Amino acid sequence: MITNPHPIPFNQPFLAGKEFEYMESAIRKEKKLSGNGHFTRLCQQFFEEKYGFGKCFLSTSCTDALEMAALLLDIQPGDEVIIPSYTFVSSANSFALRGAKIRFVDSKSDFPGMDESKVEALINERTKAIVAVHYGGVPCAMDILQNLSKKHGIPLIEDAAQAIDSFFEGKALGSFGDLAAFSFHETKNIHCGEGGMLVVNNPNLVKRAEVIWEKGTDRAALFRGEIDKYGWKDLGSSFLLSELQAAYLFAQLENLKIIQFRRKMIWEDYAAWFSGRQDQIQVLPIPYLKSLEDSIKDLGKVETQTQPGNHHVFYLLFETLEYRQECIRRLKEKGILAVFHYQSLHKSEYIQKHQPEEYFRDLPNSDRFTDCLLRLPLFYELPDLTK
Amino acid sequence: MITNPHPIPFNQPFLAGKEFEYMESAIRKEKKLSGNGHFTRLCQQFFEEKYGFGKCFLSTSCTDALEMAALLLDIQPGDEVIIPSYTFVSSANSFALRGAKIRFVDSKSDFPGMDESKVEALINERTKAIVAVHYGGVPCAMDILQNLSKKHGIPLIEDAAQAIDSFFEGKALGSFGDLAAFSFHETKNIHCGEGGMLVVNNPNLVKRAEVIWEKGTDRAALFRGEIDKYGWKDLGSSFLLSELQAAYLFAQLENLKIIQFRRKMIWEDYAAWFSGRQDQIQVLPIPYLKSLEDSIKDLGKVETQTQPGNHHVFYLLFETLEYRQECIRRLKEKGILAVFHYQSLHKSEYIQKHQPEEYFRDLPNSDRFTDCLLRLPLFYELPDLTK
Ligand SMILES: Cc1ncc(COP(=O)(O)O)c(/C=N/[C@@H]2[C@H](O)[C@@H](O)[C@@H](OP(=O)(O)OP(=O)(O)OC[C@H]3O[C@@H](n4cc(C)c(=O)[nH]c4=O)C[C@@H]3O)O[C@@H]2C)c1O
Ligand SMILES: Cc1ncc(COP(=O)(O)O)c(/C=N/[C@@H]2[C@H](O)[C@@H](O)[C@@H](OP(=O)(O)OP(=O)(O)OC[C@H]3O[C@@H](n4cc(C)c(=O)[nH]c4=O)C[C@@H]3O)O[C@@H]2C)c1O
C-alpha cells in the first residue's frame, strides 16, 4: 500500500465497453438525445427482467428518483418520514422538499446501516413513509421492514443508491419496497456521470409515476399514439435521463459482471491485506455483514448472482476521529486519497434550524461512523495498492 | 415543399463540432463525469463573458433551473406567480411544486408571446414573481416588465428556455431578470439532449443558489478547499448537469455562430417561400416581430450579434383549428412532420382541479394560438424543403 508512486484518487469514472459506440448510435441511428427513447427502454428492461423489478423509470439522479417517490406518495407539510441519520443528504432532503419532518433512526452499533429494531418506536399517525437505506450496498433486514410496513400500512421506500446487484435472502434489493431509488452517479458501481432510476413495485402507483416523470403531463401517452395532444395533469418535473447518458449506462450494464468481479477482487485484496495488520496500523476493520474472515471465506462460495452486498465500499473504522484524520493525512502523503463519508443528518444545520428540538435525540452510532469511518479508493481501474 | 421523398422529422439532434472529442476528454483527461467540473465551468464562463450574465449554473433541464428559481425566491403555499398561459407546462409547474397559485396572462393578439400590458392588473400583495417567457426566442418588452418589477418590488424571472443568443435593445435575453432559465433540450438551438442553466443576475441570490444547486449542501465550498467537510444547509436537489453533457454542450457553444447562421438560412427560405403563397395554401404567416417583409429585409442588416429573435421557431397561423389539422395531415402525407405547440395552461386539467374558478378567466389569444399555430421543421441538418 506504500509503494505506488502515482497519486491515487478516491474514485474515477471509467469506460467498460461500448459507451461511445452507443452514444454515437443514439445520435446517428436513433436520432434522439432527449429522454425516454431507445436506450432508456433498454436500461429499464434490463432491470425489470434481470431483477424482477416493477416498472422502472430512469431519472437524472437518485435524488430526483426520491423526489418522484415523495410526489407519488403525496407527502404533505407536517407528514413524517423515517430515515437513517447516517446517509446522504438527498435521502432526507427529497422529503423535506415536500414539507415533511424527518424522524431519524440510529445506525447499528457494529455497522453504519440503520438499526431496524429502532424503527417501530418512531411510527405515529403522521408517518407517511419508511426509507430503508442499504449502506454500501449491504442489505437492510428487509423482512423486518416489510413486516412493519404491512402492520402499520406505511409505504416502504428503498434508497438503493449504492445497492445495484445486491440481494437479501436471494431477492434483489430494489424489489422489496413499494418504491426504490438507484443512483448511477460517477461514484457508483455502474455509472453514467449523473443518473438514477425509480422502481415502482406497487402497481397502483405506476400510471401516476409516468405522468410525474414526464413533467406532470401525459406526454408519454402521446408518443405511444394513445392520445392526440398532451397537457398538464399533475405535479411533476423533467425527470428524464438524456439518451446520451442512457446509452452510456446501457454499455455499463452489459458489462455489469466484469465490473462487479473487478470490485470484488479489489475488495478482497484489501480485506486480506488488513486482516493481518490490525495492530500495526491501529485500525479496526469492520465486518462486511459477517466477520472479516468468514466473509472472505464465504465470498468464494456464495453464488455471485444473489450475494448480499456488492463491494461498493471498503471501509475501516478507527477508534477516534483523531486517528482517522491522521490516517487520511498519512495516506495523502503517499498519494492515496481516502475519504470519510456521511455526516449525521440529525445534527445538520438544516435540521437544527427547521425541526423542533424533540428531533435532536442522541444517535451515538451514527455520530461514531461520522467521525471514525474511512473509505479506501475502490474503482474499476484502480491499480493494485496492496502489492 | 412537396418534392422531398424522405420523411422529415420536426426536429433532430445534431453534432456541430468536437462533441465526442470533449466527452472523451472529460473521461480520460479530466477524469470526471459527475457535475460541476471542467466543462461545466467552461460553459458557464462562456455565457457569463459573452452575454454579461450574472453567475451561471448548468442544470439538468430548464425545468430544474426554474425549480431552483422557485426555491431561491422562497415561494410558499398561497403565494402567486404571474405567468403566460401559452407556454410550456414547466414554466408554471416549477412554481406549483412550491405551492404557488398561478395568475395567467394572455398572449398578444398578433403574437404568441405574453401581453405585457396585462400584467399589472394581476399584481396583488401575494404576488411573489413575474415570469417573462420569450416565446420562440422573441423578446418580451423587458423595459415594461423591469419597470413593473421595480415599481412593485416583485422579482422578475426570465423563462429563456428558447431564447439563447437573442437580444432586446442590444442587451442579451437572460440578463434582465433577477433570475433567468435556459434550456438545452434536444429541441433547442443549442442542445445536449436534456439540459438547462440558471442565471443569477441578482448578486444577493448567488451564494444560496450554489447551495441549492449542490443538493442543499456546501459541497462546492469543500471542493474549492474552503472548508474541510460539507453538510446539509438548505433545501436543494441534484441540479448538476453531468460533465458528459457539459462537454457535449461546450462543443455546441463553440459552434454557436454557424448553428445560428444555418437556422437563419432555413428560416429565411421558409419566409420567402410563404410570402408569395398565402392565398394558395390558406395560411397566414405571422410577422416575426415586424411584418414578414420588413423582417426579411432587416435580417440582412441587423447585426447578428444583437438581433431580437434567434430563429428558434418558424410558425404559421391558420384561421381555424380544422385548417391547421388539415395542413398537418397533408404535410404528413408528404413525409413532413409539422406540429402545433403549447396548450393554454389555464385550461389544463391540473389548473381546473387545483385552482379556484376565479383563475379560469377567458384568455382568447392564448386559446387561438393553441388551436391555430403550426410549427415547421427547423433544425441544423434540415434539408432544403423549399426547392
Ligand atoms: C418556454 C419553456 N419553458 C421551459 C421549458 C422546459 O425546458 P426543459 O425541457 O429544458 O426542462 C420549455 C421546453 N419545452 C420543450 C419544447 O419547447 C416543447 O415543444 C416540448 O417539446 P416536445 O419534445 O414535447 O415535443 P414537440 O416536438 O414540441 O411536440 C411534440 C408533439 O406534442 C404536441 N404537444 C406539444 C406541447 C408542447 C404540448 O404542450 N402539448 C402537445 O400536445 C405537439 C406535437 O404533436 O417540450 C420541450 C421540453 C419551454 O418551451
Ligand atoms: C444513500 C444515498 N442516497 C441518495 C444519493 C443521491 O444519489 P444521486 O447523486 O444519484 O442523486 C446518494 C449519493 N451519494 C453520493 C456518494 O455516495 C456520496 O459519497 C457523495 O459523493 P461526493 O462526490 O460528494 O464525494 P465523496 O467522494 O463521497 O466525498 C468527497 C469528500 O466529501 C466529504 N463529505 C462527503 C459526504 C457524503 C458528506 O456528506 N460530507 C462530506 O464532507 C468526504 C470527502 O472528503 O455524494 C454522492 C452524490 C447516496 O449515497
Image (cartoon, coloured by chain):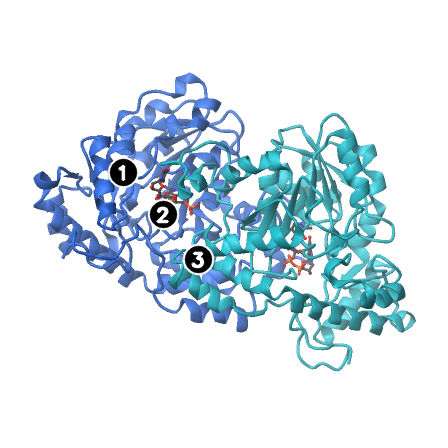
Chain colours: A blue, B cyan
Ligand 2: does it lie within 8 Å of the C-beta at label 1?
A: no
Ligand 2 within 8 A of label 2's CB?
A: no
How many residues crowd mark 2 within 10 Å: few (<14), some (14–19), many (20+)?
many
Mark 1 or mark 3, earlier in chain: 3
Residue drawn at x 29%, y 46% is: A137
Q: Amino acid at mark 3?
A: Gln
Residue denoted by label 2: A175
Q: Residues within 10 Å of mark 1 (few under 14, many from 20)?
A: some
Which numbered tag is attached to residue A141?
Answer: 1
Q: Amino acid at mark 1?
A: Ala
Question: Is A200 on the left-hand or right-hand side of B189?
Answer: left
| Circles 3 and 2 in contact, beta carbons < 8 Å | no
Which chain is indicated by disc 2?
A: A
Rounded to the nearest angstrom, the CA distance separating label 1 from label 3 is 26 Å
Helix, strand or loop at label 1? It is loop
Precedes in sequence: disc 3 or disc 2: 3
- Foreground residue, B350 or B291? B291
At a point 58% along the width and 52% down the height, the residue shown is B196
- Give how far across and how far down residue B333 sits, in percent: 73, 75
Q: Find disc 3 in the rendering and name its residue.
A: A44
Residue at position x 40%, y 21% from top?
A359
The answer to whether residue A346 is seen in the rendering is yes
Q: Which mark is residue A346?
A: none
Q: Amino acid at mark 2?
A: Ser
CA gap, disc 1 to disc 2?
13 Å
Position of A163 with respect to B119 (left or right) is left
Q: Quadrant of the C terminus of chain A?
A: bottom left
Q: Indicate the quadrant where residue A130 lies.
A: top left
Q: Is residue B44 above or below residue B130?
A: below
